[in-house]
Amino acid sequence: MVSVKVTTVGNSVGMVLPKEALAKLKVKKGDRLFLVETEDGYVMTPYDPEFRAQMEAAEDGMRRYRNALRELAM
């Protein structure tokens, strides 16, 4: 478990992540993190959950229209 401190940053509130947490998340200064709500609370992730849904929709469309896409590629 990693403990973080919520602190004031200008007129906003932020939290400081220790180096170990940054390394595990594979993020650096300036990267964007997402808080995803789950049954058990929030999960912090560097991966955009909306992108995952878009990719699943694209994969479904590619499977569904595989023959048409193959013909268009010729």
Image (cartoon, rainbow, N blue to C red):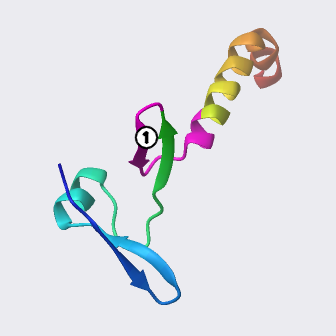
Residue 30 position, x and y percent, is 43, 73
Q: Is residue 5 left or right of residue 70?
A: left
Task: Look at the picture and state if 32 lies above or below 24.
Answer: below
* Picture coordinates of residue 41, whole percent (x, y): 43, 40
Report the number of discs.
Answer: 1
Residue 43 inside the magenta-drawn segment: yes
Observer-nearest residue: 17 or 70?
17
Picture quadrant where residue 43 is located: top left
Q: Is residue 4 above or below residue 69?
A: below
- Image vertical order of residue 60 relative to residue 52, above or below: above
Q: Position of residue 45 (x, y in %)?
A: 41, 48
Q: Quadrant of residue 65?
A: top right
Residue 7 within the segment the image draws in magenta? no
Identified at 75% across, 16% down, the residue is 70
**From the viewer's perspective, is 64 left or right of 1?**
right
Q: Please, is residue 64 above or below residue 20 in the view? A: above
Disc 1 target residue = 41
Disc 1: CA contacts within 10 A as few (<14), some (14-19) or many (>=20): few
What is the three-letter code of the residue carrying label 1? Gly
**Under tag 1, what secondary structure?**
strand
Observer-nearest of 27 and 41: 41
Q: Quadrant of residue 23?
A: bottom left
Q: State which region is magenta.
A: 39-52
At 78% from the left and 21% from the top, the residue drawn is 74
